[in-house]
Amino acid sequence: MRLRDRIALVTGAASGIGAATARRFAREGATVAINDAKPEGLEAVAGEIRAAGAKVLSVNLKGTFLCAQAALPGMRERAWGRVVNTSSIGSLGNIGQANYAASKAGVIGLTKTLALEYAKYGVTVNAIAPGPVMTAMLAGVPDAIRERIIAQVPVGRIASPDEIAGVHVFLASDEASFITGQVIFADGGMSVGI
């Protein structure tokens, strides 16, 4: 068990990658705290906010910043910690998703800055930038669109949430103790050559 005696906070853990990551961390021996912002009953308002771009920036970038701000002082005190943020291949840009791309690119900048600031305290900070993953959101996409997405992935398929969770576990383990400030594009090769 690679994460025995470790404590992990997994945000967005109600579904998709977050849920798979929380399950994997627990299987690897970590004590896992999970949270998730559930927009039930607020979907109409959330849709308006997303259309304006503020909900995306608040959740993806500000939420990541606030979680790090809360967790890093304790890691510094203990002289050990692992922060694994979630970015996206969307950080490289995508038509019609300026707010999303900006928020996920911001996560990369935040990751690299925190890595520099906290390395001397025994804390590593890395990010994962997944490509298409079979989450509930992608499962709801029409087959024709899903096939177009798959056609853009050099390995020819969509990842499972558990595959991305495995990368999270690796970066949170002692096996990754010399890796900090890095972004792993777990995207089936989509970002190669971009």
Image: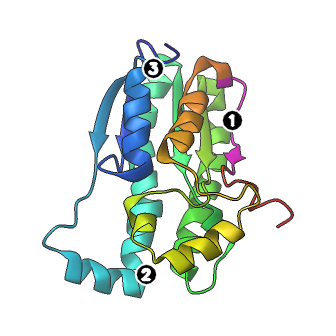
Q: Position of residue 94 (x, y in %)?
A: 64, 78
Q: Residue at x 55, y 43 (%)?
A: 164
Sooner in the amino-acid sequence: mark 1 or mark 2: 2
- How would you classify the magenta stretch by its main secondary structure? loop
Give how far across and how far down residue 107 sits, in percent. 56, 57
Residue 100 shows in the view: yes
Residue bearing the label numbered 3: 28
Q: Residues within 10 Å of mark 2 (few under 14, many from 20)?
A: some
Identified by mark 1, the residue type is Thr
Residue at the image position 52 percent from the left and 73 percent from the top: 100
Residues in magenta? Answer: 176-185
The C terminus is located in which quarter?
bottom right
Q: Earlier in the sequence, mark 2 or mark 3?
A: 3
Residue 115 point in image, percent of width and height: 64, 40
Nearest to the eye among marks 3 and 1: give it: 3
Q: Amino acid at mark 2?
A: Gly
User: Which residue is identified by label 1?
Assistant: 180
Q: Residue at x 44, y 13 (%)?
A: 4
- Local SS, label 3: loop
Is 38 located above or below residue 13 in the figure? Answer: below
Q: What residue is pinned by disc 2?
A: 53
Along the horizontal axis of the image, is 38 left or right of 157? left
